[in-house]
Amino acid sequence: MKALLRPNFDKDGSVAGARLTVEALLETGITPLLDRADAAVISPVNEGCLIGEFGEMLSDCDIVITIGGDGTILHAVQAILGRKKPLLGINTGRIGFLTQLEISELGHFSRLKEGNYEILNRMLLKGTLDREDDCFFALNDIVIFRGGDHLIEIEVHCDTGPVASHRADGVIFSTPTGSTAYSLSAGGSIVHPSLELIQMTAVCPHSHFNHSAILSPERTYRAKEAAGSLRGGAVIMVDGMRAGVLERDKSLTIAKAPQSIQFIDLGIRDFYNCVDIKLSYRR
């Protein structure tokens, strides 16, 4: 088995964590693959590793291991889109809700070598701005917001007619995976990641109606600014990264993506156990 490492050295402890990960993989009989720039940082723990360019080695690896936090996983998702390469996250961040292992748990790599794990498919959202080639994919969420101190007026439609109209700081469209991220902070529900649905949550809505809505993943949704909106242009964020601008005369189409992302589940703890431990900050 070959494991391609994707460390985030901006996280405290990730350099030491990457060295420990390489050592643990080699001891288990799994070959670590390292990008040249990453190998230079964690040197001299490179003996037994294969070193090259990340994009080229992606085709040759069996799994991708991130070392960092949830943001590291979200960036890795963008790098492996369209590739059936399972992800395994090692936490050196603060919460690391999407990660599977802490640095103290690297002994569980033996499960990888033995094939004692499951592959879980995580749903993605696809957002499209007018043209099909102007699209992006989200593991957590797609967010439309104005920024500053101005509310945004967003109308949402599907093929059967109007769905909702929100006057708020922003609107979040999240996957089940993203239900424990920004959506949860905005009052959305916790959703098990094995489900397939789209959750729509308004951020600080200027209305008595402040509940999130569960939308069918079988339909396509179009979001645009209301005709009477006083200010035009809204920012589109995808998994916390700026993806574009929703102009007043354009619409953003949101749908379940045709592809998914694979996560490795080593069976150490279940989803609700993670919710209880990591989101209550009892660590």
Image: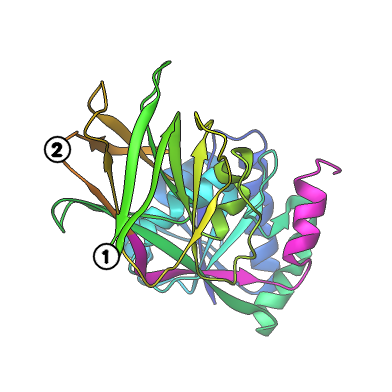
- From the viewer's side, name the closer residue of 198 and 151: 151
Amino acid on which disc 2 is placed = Asp
Q: Position of residue 116 (x, y in %)?
A: 70, 82
Label 2 residue SS: loop
The one nearer the camera, 247 or 224, is 224
Residue 149 position within the rendered picture, expressed as x and y whole percent measured from the top left: 43, 15
> The magenta stretch spans which residues?
255-283
SS for callout 1: loop
The front one of 147 and 224 is 224
Which of the image's four quarters has the C terminus?
Answer: top right
The image shows residue 209, relative to residue 260, as above or below, that is above
Which mark, residue 159? 1
Q: Which residue is mark 2?
A: 249
Q: Is residue 152 above or below residue 121?
A: above
Q: Nearer the viewer, residue 142 or 64?
A: 142
Please provide percent x and percent y for residue 213.
Answer: 52, 54
Q: Write the residue at 60% across / 70% down.
A: 264
The three-letter code of the residue at mark 1 reads Asp
| Residue under the image location 45 percent in, 53 percent down | 76
Quadrant location, the N terminus:
bottom right
Q: Residue at x 52, y 32 (%)?
A: 207
**How is colour applied across the structure in the image?**
rainbow
Inter-mark Cα distance, 1 to 2:
19 Å
Left or right: 270 as drawn, with respect to 176: right
Mark closest to the chain's N terminus, 1 or 2: 1
Residue 43 visible from this viewpoint: no
